[in-house]
Amino acid sequence: MNDEVILRGGDGSSPALRDRFLKAFAADDYAALRGLSADLRNCTNILPSTVCAALGLPRGSTYAKAARTIVTS
């Protein structure tokens, strides 16, 4: 597991890890997204609405939902 993952209350990942995910998403770096998804699979932080829309997810979806969507696509 990535050493940047810091669980806060058992349900959130570090801001640095979430930022890396968003940067990889913006760059269409699918390989990086798949790797980061393993570390975000339990993250209950809410995704930005623009990312939700781009992934076809409902507004208010979590990073965990995005991670599952990316891994299964």
Image (spheres, rainbow, N blue to C red):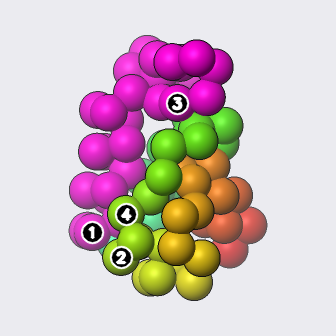
The crowd level at tag 4 (other Cα within 10 Å; few <14, some 14-19, many 20+) is some
| Of the image marks 2 and 3, the number of the one nearer the N terminus | 3
Residue 26 numbered mark, or none:
1
Q: Residue 18: say if magenta.
A: yes
Residue 66 numbered mark, or none:
none
Q: Residue 30: say if magenta.
A: no
55 or 48: nearer the eye? 48
In the picture, which quadrant includes the N terminus? top right
Residue type, mark 2 in image: Thr
Q: Which of marks 1 and 3 is in front?
A: 3
Give the number of callouts.
4
- Give the CA distance from mark 2 to mark 3: 20 Å
Residue 12 numbered mark, or none:
3
| Of the image marks 1 and 2, the number of the one nearer the N terminus | 1
The residue tagged with tag 2: helix, strand or loop? helix
56 or 59: nearer the eye? 59
Q: Which of marks 1 and 2 is in front?
A: 2
Q: Name the residue under label 4.
A: 48
| Of the image marks 3 and 4, the number of the one nearer the N terminus | 3
- Give the CA distance from mark 1 to mark 2: 11 Å
Q: Name the residue under label 2.
A: 50
Q: Which residue is drawn at 37% across and 63% down?
A: 48
- Give the CA distance from mark 1 to mark 4: 12 Å
Residue type, mark 4 in image: Pro
